[in-house]
Image: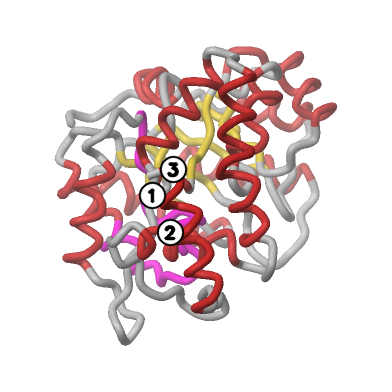
Amino acid sequence: MTAMSPEELAARLKSGLLSFPVTHFDADLQFDEPRYRQHLAWQSGFDVAGLFAAGGTGEGFSLTSEEMDRVVRVAVDEVAGRVPVVAPATGGTVVSVAQAKAAQAAGASGLLLFPPYLTEADQRGLVEHIGAVCRATDLGVIVYSRANAVLTDATVAEVADRNPNLIGLKDGVGDIEQMTRTYARVGDRLIYVGGLPTAETFALPLLQLGVSTYSSALYNFLPEFALRFYAAVRAQDRTAVYRMLGEFVLPYLDIRDRAKGYAVSIVKAGLTAVGRDGGRVRPPLTDLTEAELAELTALVEKVS
């Protein structure tokens, strides 16, 4: 894929479902490039609008900067222009700036800026953090509002005004009033991405607030189901959405909610359940138990 302008990337991403692929590890929990490439080839073969490498579902928080750069470069090479690849930037400002520059050098189409780790930050500090990353790259940047970096509507408006290459807000909070205020203030200047764990649960109501797309972890192992669900949301087909919620998504959540970190672990287990060997998660995450994997496998078989 030739280089995409921020405006072109925004138009592409908001047009469809977004994939956040897992990162595969071998038996020693080192990056397993062959299995990751196989997964990307499968993921990019469907009608998906963007592929976010080494994101939350991809355990980006467990990767070194060197590993992250390698994962992004492998994704860009393997996808070979079929789908835009969006790279992560994480940690403090200096680290995030370095990762933004590395992502552009690797040929990524855009950047997802995660919250800085550990420390709390005032809105003024977040404005400067976001601005520094945006200035470090020509790529379109999406900022993830979550955890210790929850952005107010006034902050979103300010960073959008200051940074022309800021193209989107990913919402990991689900505060209806705050999203209403943000969209009322900023409007279509940005694209809005649903970023809550198992975003399908919130997709229909958030559509009314301007959130036109979302990050689907389910797409990792049930791409056809995930795309059918997205199509039903976009058509505002409440009957179809609630049928699919009832037959798969809500029982899936019951398993996911049994342990902290299972929002990622259950996705790798889902790949194993469909015969694609998702492998293990890195500590501090933990894998599903054998009984939970069997339960998930039985659930997957109902909708496969």
Q: Residue 276: x percent and y percent?
A: 28, 61
The magenta stretch is 49-71
Residue with the mark numbered 1: 220
Q: Residue 67: x percent and y percent?
A: 33, 69
**Circle 2: element type:** helix
Name above or below for residue 259 compared with residue 157.
Answer: below
**Neighbour class for label 1 at 10 Å: few (<14), some, many (≥20)?**
many
For the point 52% across and 59% down, which residue is it?
94
Q: Amino acid type of disc 2? A: Gly
Q: CA distance from mark 1 to mark 3?
A: 14 Å
Nearer the camera: disc 2 or disc 1: 2
Q: Amino acid type of disc 1? A: Asn
Name above or below for residue 101 compared with residue 203.
Answer: below
Nearer the camera: disc 2 or disc 3: 3
| First reached walking from the N terminus: tag 2 or tag 3 | 2
Q: Are marks 2 and 1 in contact (CB under 8 Å)?
A: yes
The C terminus is located in which quarter? top left
**Is 65 a magenta residue?**
yes
Q: Amino acid type of disc 3? A: Val
Left/right of residue 278 with respect to residue 231 in the rendered view: left
Q: Which label is found at residue 165?
A: none
Q: Which label is found at residue 303?
A: 3
The N terminus is located in which quarter? top left
Residue with the mark numbered 2: 270
Protein image colouring: secondary structure
**Circle 1: element type:** helix
Q: Is residue 190 visible?
A: yes
Q: To which quarter of the image does residue 212 belong?
A: top right
Q: CA distance from mark 2 to mark 3?
A: 12 Å
**Neighbour class for label 2 at 10 Å: few (<14), some, many (≥20)?**
many
Q: To which quarter of the image does residue 200 belong?
A: top right
